[in-house]
Image (cartoon, rainbow, N blue to C red):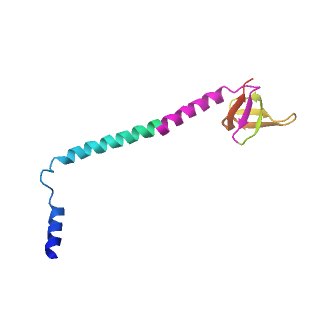
Amino acid sequence: MNYLLSNLYLSMAAPPAGAGGSGGGSMVTTVITFGLVILIFYFMIIRPQSKKQKETKNMLAALKAGDKVVTIGGIRGVIHSVKDETVIIKVDDNAKLEFSRSAVATIIERS
């Protein structure tokens, strides 16, 4: 039994013959793998998110009176007037609400 344990210990402690140069290849493989993971994250997550953010910014900059919109809270209405940071949305004949520009989620119909 002791003979088996000592052989197991020796085989784990001593590197196999000819394994001195294999550490560099493993490092290159690891760097390539991490590079591929970073590229996948960029094209699957970061790029689409920045593209959507740019489209939203352009949509909010193009708001004008008469556009039918939906807010992030689900309120539908027609833009009555546009200010620098806010929009006034007419939701009924006698009801107008003032929202931040960033509260507009989508434009249903352009005027």
40 or 2: which is nearer to us? 2
Query: In the displayed structure, would residue 109 be above or below residue 14?
Result: above
Q: Residue 7, image x and y in percent?
A: 14, 68
**Residue at left offset 64%, top offset 27%:** 61
Q: Is residue 86 left or right of residue 39?
A: right
Quadrant showing the C terminus:
top right
* Outermost residue to the right: 94
Q: Is residue 57 magenta?
A: yes
7 or 97: which is nearer to us? 7
Q: Residue 49, image x and y in percent?
A: 53, 37
Q: Residue 74, image x and y in percent?
A: 73, 41
Q: How many marks?
A: 0
74 or 83: which is nearer to us? 74
Q: Is residue 54 left or right of residue 96?
A: left
Quadrant showing the N terminus:
bottom left
Q: Residue 30, image x and y in percent?
A: 30, 45
Q: Is residue 41 left or right of residue 92?
A: left
25 or 106: which is nearer to us? 25
* Outermost residue to the bottom: 1
**Residue at left offset 15%, top offset 56%:** 16
Residue span colored magenta = 44-72
Q: Is residue 52 left or right of residue 71?
A: left
**Residue at left offset 20%, top offset 48%:** 23
What secondary structure characterizes most of the magenta part? Answer: helix
Q: Is residue 61 magenta?
A: yes
Query: In the displayed structure, would residue 63 be above or below residue 23?
Result: above
Task: State the image quarter where residue 42 is shown.
Answer: top left
